[in-house]
Image (cartoon, grey):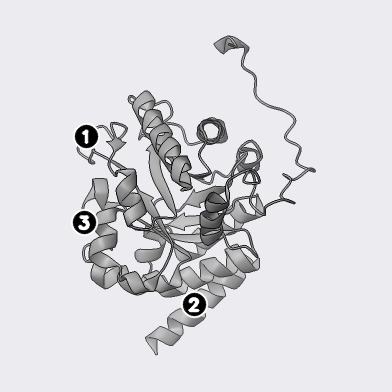
């Protein structure tokens, strides 16, 4: 093992040599089994290679946060407009009509709240229930550098092992404690660890400096979290920058369901993610749809 004081930042990122996707359109997925690829292809559009996910799993540790007080009223109408839903099994069963038939990335970690240490999670869903719900992927936080780092990594490993047995991908979510530095060095470390452990794709955060290297250093697709609520123009700009620098999509919650027009926001995000439109074009589309709603 390398000594800690001998670890150096990487230098050769091969920015002029994209990952080989000639055998399957998603980075790092060429050697997966048929079932794993089939589920990944329901998450990531086969034409764009990207995804727009709607996250509304926040209640598993935050409770009824703004916009999620009545998910039957705020989230259910949005389901048809997202590529993928990311939620808890409770939120899914109580809120989303099965006939919507959207692929589900199932939140499978839990056991904490905003009143306690966030990194102290456990695997909260048995693989049998994930299969019963028809999940196309499972998700868990990985808290690199936090108090319960080892436990959170163990949770992700458990999901990866059970998911691989049944052809279900695992999305590792890079959890960040309030005292951690959100920079390229940290997210480069966390996303690479998740991929090396076997996660088929990773959810992380966009950072203004060095994000492209985070993507290049991670051998599986990265989708970005929305994080705190931003003005719509800024959220679309963040999405555009991330996609331009190699992200494979977005998994946004508050920047959608707390928007003045959530459906318009989902459509604007799709324009950026799938159709290559600039953030300014997408924002103008959002304004047009919002004005139509007002009329």
Between 167 and 81, the one lying in front of the other is 167
Q: How crowded is mark 1: few (under 14 residues within 10 Å), some or many (20 or more)?
A: few
Q: Mark 3 points at which residue?
A: 64
The mark nearer the N terminus, 1 or 3, is 3
Q: Residues within 10 Å of mark 3 (few under 14, many from 20)?
A: few
Image coordinates for residue 201, horizontal then vertical, percent: 53, 45
Vertical placement of 149 versus 118: above or below? above
Q: What element carries label 2?
A: helix
First in sequence: mark 1 vs mark 2: 1
| Secondary structure beneath label 3 | loop
- Which quadrant of the structure image shows residue 241? bottom right
Q: Do the residues labelled 2 and 3 touch (CB within 8 Å)?
A: no
Q: Residue at x 67, y 52 (%)?
A: 24
Q: Position of residue 226 (x, y in %)?
A: 45, 53
Q: Which residue is drawn at 19% across and 38% down?
A: 115
Residue tagged 1: 116
In whole angstroms, how far apart are the C-alphas of marks 2 and 3?
28 Å
Q: Residue 90 in the image: x percent, y percent? A: 24, 56
Place of residue 5 in the rendered image (x, y in percent of width and height, measured from the top left): 58, 10
Give the residue drawn at x 30%, y 53%. Answer: 88
In front: label 2 or label 3: 3
Q: Residue 287 carries which label?
A: 2
Q: How far apart are marks 1 and 3 (CA)?
A: 17 Å
């Amino acid at each position: 093992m390398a000594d800690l004081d001998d670890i150096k930042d990487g230098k050769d990122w091969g920015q002029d040599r994209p990952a080989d996707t000639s055998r399957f359109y998603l980075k790092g997925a060429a050697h997966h089994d048929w079932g794993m690829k089939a589920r990944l292809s329901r998450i990531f559009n086969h034409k764009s290679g990207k995804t727009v996910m709607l996250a509304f799993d926040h209640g598993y540790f935050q409770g009824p946060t703004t916009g999620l007080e009545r998910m039957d009223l705020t989230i259910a109408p949005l389901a048809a407009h997202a590529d993928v839903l990311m939620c808890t099994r409770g939120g899914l069963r109580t809120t989303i009509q099965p006939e919507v038939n959207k692929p589900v990335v199932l939140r499978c970690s839990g056991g904490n709240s905003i009143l306690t240490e966030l990194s102290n999670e456990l695997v909260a869903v048995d693989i049998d229930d994930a299969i019963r719900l028809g999940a196309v992927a499972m998700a868990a936080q990985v808290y690199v550098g936090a108090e319960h780092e080892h436990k959170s990594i163990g949770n992700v490993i458990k999901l990866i092992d059970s998911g691989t047995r049944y052809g279900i991908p695992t999305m590792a979510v890079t959890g960040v404690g309030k005292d951690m530095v959100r920079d390229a060095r940290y997210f480069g470390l966390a996303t690479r660890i998740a991929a090396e452990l076997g996660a088929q794709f990773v959810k992380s955060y966009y950072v203004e400096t060095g994000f492209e290297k985070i993507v290049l250093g991670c051998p599986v697709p990265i989708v970005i979290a929305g994080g705190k609520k931003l003005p719509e123009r800024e959220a679309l700009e963040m999405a555009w920058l991330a996609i331009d620098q190699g992200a494979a999509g977005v998994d946004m919650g508050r920047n959608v369901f707390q928007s003045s027009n959530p459906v318009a926001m989902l459509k604007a995000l799709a324009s950026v993610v799938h159709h290559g439109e600039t953030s300014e074009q997408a924002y103008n589309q959002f304004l047009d749809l919002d004005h139509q709603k007002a009329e």
